[in-house]
Image (cartoon, rainbow, N blue to C red):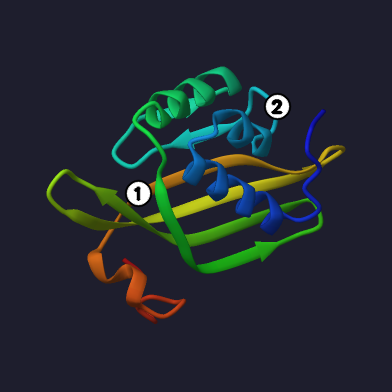
Amino acid sequence: MPVMFATSEEAELAFYDALERADLARLMQVWADEEEIICVHPGGLRVVGHHAVKESWQEILANGALHIRPSNAVVLHSMMSAVHSLVEQVTVHGTESTEIANCYATNVYHKGPTGWRMIMHHASAAPGQAGMLDLHDVPGMLH
C-alpha cells in the first residue's frame, strides 16, 4: 500500500530519512511510480526512468547509509508542483577520519492522486562554505 505524503516537505523528510536508514523500499515510496522521473547524482550521468533510478540508489545504498543533513531550503510552490533547492551536508565516515562535503540539490515534487511524489533529484558538488551561507548564498551574483 503506497504511503500518502500530504505535502512536498513531508515527502522530502521521508526521502532523507530513507537515505539515513539505507532503506531502498522506503526511498522508492517517495519517488513517483512513473517512467518520467530523473535523478542526477553528483558527478554522475543523468538517470531516467523508475527502474534505472531504483538501480542507481540500490548501488549507492549497498555501501551503507548516507548521512545527509539538508539545510538552507528555498521552496517554490504551485498548486500541483514544488521545487526545493537546498544544501546537502554529506558526512563521510572513513576508517581514520570523518569528512564533510556539501552538495547543492534540487528536488522536484508533483502532486498526484497518491499525494506528493518526487519526480526529480539533481545533486552537484558545492563549495565547502555553502552550508554556512545565508539562504541566498551570494546576493546579486549570477554565475
Residue pictured at 61% horizontal, 56% vertical: 83
Drawn side of residue 64 relative to residue 127, left or right: right
Residue pictured at 26% horizontal, 58% vertical: 100
Distance CA(mark 1)–CA(mark 2): 24 Å
- Check the image and report above or below for 138 versus 109: below
Graded by Cα atoms within 10 Å as few (under 14), some (14 to 19) or many (20 or more), the crowding at tag 2 reads some
Drawn side of residue 70 relative to residue 50, left or right: left
- Occupied quadrant, residue 114: top right
Could you tell me which quadrant the N terminus lies in? top right
Identify the amino acid type marked 2.
Answer: Asp
Relative depth, front residue between 143 and 63: 63
Identify the amino acid type marked 1.
Answer: Ser
Task: Locate residue 105, reporting x and y percent.
Answer: 45, 53
The residue that mark 1 highlights is 124
The residue that mark 2 highlights is 33
Which is more N-terminal, label 2 or label 1? 2
Label 2: which secondary element: loop
